[in-house]
Amino acid sequence: MTQDAIRINGLVKTYQGSKGQPAKTALKGVDLAIPRGSVFGLLGPNGAGKSTLINILAGLVTKSAGKVQIWGFDQDVNPRQSRAAIGVMPQELNLDPFFTPRAALEVQAGLYGVPKSQRRSDEILELVGLSDKAEVYARTLSGGMRRRLLLAKALVHRPNVLVLDEPTAGVDIELRQMLWDNVRNLNAEGMTIILTTHYLEEAEEMCDEIAIINHGEVVARDSTENLLTTLDAKTLVIHPENDVAKAPSADGIEGELRTDGSLAFTYRSGVTKAEAVLDMVREAGIRIRDLRSEEPHLQDVFLALTSSRPDFGAKSG
Ligand code: ADP
Ligand code: MG
């Protein structure tokens, strides 16, 4: 009995190289469990393997090895049930240009075997703000409207799990807001949401749990909160009374003079106390006019895990 929305074991994907191109292993044995009811973020730099993973879940890419269960259904054993449990809004704008939004939703509902009496195309068009475009050809829709339609298509069969692949890459603020409002509402109604995004502040704000993927491997997977505390780096920003030519540093305290004349001191709160930073500053003869502290952001965690900066050793499994 599983309470996971998605359970992935040993997932491998190797793309066969064509025309002399070498084969590319995009996923190198990924294990991942995504709990039901969560808003789950899949983060990673370009080429990390996020879309590959999502397209395997969607049934658009065939895996090379491993096991995928969606809502408890094994993709290979119960392909129909596992497919019915998931709706995917892909990264690519792959729409038939000669369908109207309403027709596109009806066709999609047909593909998923939703009976006519249970279809709710108008309700979904309303939800994504496309009611007034229901009867125009998709090719006349703007990029933003096409994205809305892709979201609508992902929802026609009332999936338990909604997957959004880079839904806000390059979209305007209004559409981004609409997407996040929808995500929050659908999640409140019980839908599990999985999303990939480049915007780390967005993941920090939206996601309960996060997996960071790099070069086809999961390098971190935790609650957003834990991930942020993994990296216990803190920064104390001091505005001095007088101009300072150079920020002092000490063992475990990295000083930096910022362009606005403030001094930023970064230290690990598990190792160094803020008091030690203040002592060092006073000993350097600097008088403090004002001070504040900065918390680490997901950006820092992400950099720590996906680059080889030697000053961060926070790799976890
Ligand atoms: P992401 O979505 O994280 O940017 P992708 O899953 O799109 O990453 O790509 C992962 C790796 O697999 C990249 O190196 C990419 O070039 C390669 N790749 C993706 N799709 C294909 C394909 N159809 N054929 C060959 N290589 C591919
Ligand atoms: Mg991608």
Image (cartoon, grey):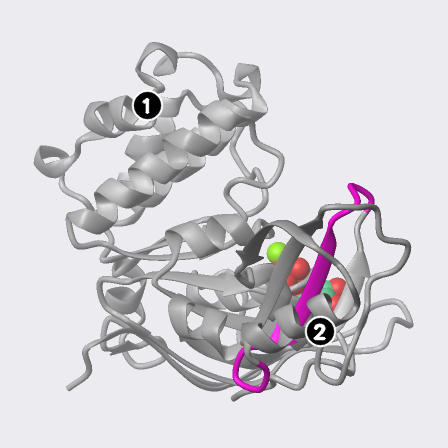
Ligand 2 picture quarter? bottom right
Please, what is the three-letter code of the amino acid marked with disc 1?
Arg
Please, what is the three-letter code of the amino acid marked with disc 2?
Met
Q: Residue sitting at 23 percent across and 45 percent down?
A: 186
Q: What secondary structure is found at the residue carrying circle 1? A: helix
Q: Which percent across, then down, holds residue 218?
A: 55, 80
Lateral position of residue 183 relative to residue 117, left or right: right
Choose between 60 and 250: the one closer to the eye.
Answer: 250
Q: Is residue 47 visible?
A: no
Occupied quadrant, residue 273: bottom right
Occupied quadrant, residue 216: bottom right
Choose between 306 and 248: the one closer to the eye.
Answer: 248
Q: State which mark lies toward you, 1 or 2.
A: 2
Choose between 267 and 79: the one closer to the eye.
Answer: 267
Circle 2 sits on which residue? 280
Q: Which percent across, then down, holds residue 37?
A: 22, 62
Q: Residue sitting at 24 percent across and 53 percent down?
A: 159
Tag of residue 164: none
The boundaries of the magenta stretch are 259-272
Instruction: Spot the residue most to the left.
Output: 117
Q: What secondary structure is found at the residue carrying circle 2? A: helix
Q: In this view, does 101 lie above or below 79?
A: above
Circle 1 sits on which residue? 102
Q: Can residue 241 be seen in this view?
A: yes
Q: Residue sitting at 27 percent across and 75 percent down?
A: 78
Is 267 covered by the magenta stretch? yes
Mark 1 neighbour density, 10 Å: few (under 14) some (14–19) many (20 or more): many
